[in-house]
Amino acid sequence: MTLEARNLVAGYGDKSILEKVSFNLADGEILAFFGHNGAGKSTTLKAVLGLLPAKEGQILLDGERIEHLTVSARLKRGLRLLPEGKGVFPDLNVQDSIEIVSQSNRDPNGAKISADDVYDLLPVLRDRRKTIAGEMSGGQQQMLAFGLALLGSPKCVLLEEPSVGLQPDLVEELFGKMSDICKKLSISAILVEHKIASAMKIADHVMIINSGKLVFNGSKAEAEQINLWNYF
Amino acid sequence: MLYVQLIADGVVTGCAIGLVAVSFAYFYATTGIFHVAHAGIYTLCGYIAWYLTGLGIPFILALIASILCGALVGMFVQVTLYQTLENKGASPLVKLIASIGVLTTLQNIVAIFFTPNIVQFDLPWRLNSLTIGGVWFSVPQILILLSSVGLFAAVVLFSKYSKLGKRIRAVASNPGLAEITHLNPQRVFVYVIAISSGLVAVPGVLVGVDQALQPYTSLIILLTAVIAMIAGGIGSLGGAFVMSIVLAVIQSLSVAFVSGRWSIAVVFAIFVLFILIRPEGLVRRKFSRAI
C-alpha cells in the first residue's frame, strides 16, 4: 500500500473541513477524487502533504506514519503535489526549471526519475527547453508542471485540477500521458478533477467528498454502476 | 563644461545609489520584504571600514571585512527576525515595521559605538584625482564607478547563469511551488540577504571615502534607491540600476537651475510624475516579483 489515510480530520484554524476521511491507494493506482467546490478535495491534498496540519487521524506512506512530519520530510519520502494553475516557475525556462528541481530532489540512493527521464517521458519539453515557462501554452505548462512533480523518487503524486484552462483534446492528451507514466513507473496518484468523464477514463478507484465527508469510495467498476451525480 | 561635469558627478552618484537599489531589489523581489534595515547595514559597513582603517588596517582588507560583516548582520536579521515573523504568519506591514526598528537600532549602535558626528576616512589617496576629457574625477569616484558597474554586471550574470541564481529566481517567481519542490525558500532567503547586504557594503564604504560618514543619512539614499527600483520596474535589476543613474543625473543637473536644497524635491516630483505616466516602471515585467 502506498498511501493510506485513517479518519483524517483537517481544516483551517479552529474550523475542521474534513470529517474522518479514510482511503487507501496502491502502487501505480490512480484515484479520481470528485466533489463540488469547497467540499474538501484540496484540503485533503494539503493535509496529506503537510501544508495543513492533521488535527486527528493518521496518514501512512508505505506503512510509515507521516502526519507529524514536515512538508520537506514528506517530499523526501516521495510525496509530490502539482498545484492548481501554479505548477511552473514563470520566469525560468524549461531547462532551468527542470535542472534546479532535479538538483533539489536528489536521492542519495539514486533518483528514480532524472531530468533526462522527464524529457523522454514528456518529449514536448525537450523541444521547448529554452522557452520561458510563463510564455508557454496552458497545455505545455501543465506538462512541465507534471514533469517537475515527477523529478526525484516520487511514490505518490497529488494532482490538483490539472485540466484547468485546457481544451478538451489537450486534457485527453495530458491525462493519457499521466496515466501511462504512473503505470509504467508504479507511481500512485490522487487526481482531483472537475472534468469527471476525462478523469474516469484513467481512474482505477473513485472517491467523492461532500461537505468534508466521503460519500463514495469504490472501484472504477463500482463507480460505473451508479450515477455519480447523486453523490454531489 | 559645467553641465558635463554635473552629468559625470550624477553618473557616479547614480552608480552608488544603483548598487543600493539593485541589492535592495534583489532581496525584495525574492522575499517580498521591504527591508528598510538595508540602510542601517549600509551605514554600519561604512563605519566598520572607517574604524578598521583607523587602526592601520589596509583599506582593501577593511573593505572586505565590512562586506563580510554586512553579510553576517543581514543573515542574522533574516534568521532571527524575518524568518520568525514569517513562521508566525506576520503581514508585510509588520515586517516593514520590524525592519524600521532594526534600522533605528543599527543607526544608534553606530552612533554609540563609533561616533554620532560626521567623520572622514584618514586615507591620503582619497584626495587624489584625475581629469578625463576635461571632466574631473576623484579616485574614490572612479572606484565607485568601476565597482558599481562591475558588481551590477556580476549580479546579473550570477542571477542568470549560476545554479544558486536560478534557484533564487525560481523562489522569486513562484514561492509556493518552490516550497513543494524542495527548493527550501527560507534557506534561499538567507543566501539572498547575505548577497544583498554584502553588496550594499561596497557603496556604504566607498561613498564614505568619497564624501563622509554620518549615522543618520543613509535613509535618504535608500529612499532614492527605492524610487529608482519602483520607477525602473519592480523586479528588474537593470531598470533599478539605470533609473538610479537617471535620477542622480537629474538631481545633479538641477543645481544648475534651482537652489541645491531643491534637488531632492525635484527627484521626488519627477518620481510622482513618472508613476502617474508609467506606473509599471521603465522595464515592463510580466511577473511582479521576477528578477
Image (tube, coloured by chain):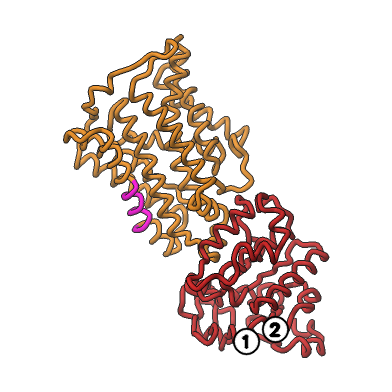
Chain colours: A red, B orange
Q: Nearer the viewer, residue A15 or B22?
A: B22
Can you identify the residue that label 1 sits on? A23
Q: Would residue A231 be found to the left or right of residue B41 on screen? A: right
Instruction: Name the residue at 47% across, 57% down.
Output: B91
Part of the protein shown in magenta: B71-80
**How far, Cα to Cα, is label 2 from label 1?**
8 Å
- For the question of whether residue B118 can be seen, the reply is yes
**At label 1, which amino acid type do we have?**
Phe
Q: Position of residue A209 (x, y in %)?
A: 68, 82
Asked whether the viewer can see residue A13, the reply is no
**Residue B246, percent from left and from top:** 51, 26
Q: Residue at x 73, y 64 (%)?
A: A164
Label 2 resides on the chain identified as A
Proximity of marks 2 and 1: CB atoms separated by less than 8 Å? yes
Under circle 1, the secondary element is strand
Crowding at dot 1, Cα within 10 Å, few <14 / some 14-19 / many 20+, comes out as some
Determine if the magenta segment contains residue B67.
no
Q: Chain of mark 1?
A: A
Query: How many C-alpha atoms fall within 10 Å of the one at disc 2: few (<14), some, or many (≥20)?
Result: many
Q: Position of residue A87 (x, y in %)?
A: 63, 62
* Magenta-drawn stretch, dominant element (helix, strand or loop): helix
Say whether residue A39 is left or right of residue A67: right
| On-image quarter of the C terminus of chain B | top right
Residue identified by numbered label 2:
A207
Q: Are tags 2 and 1 found on a single chain?
A: yes
Q: Quadrant of residue A211?
A: bottom right
The residue positioned 53% from the left and 51% from the top of the image is B166
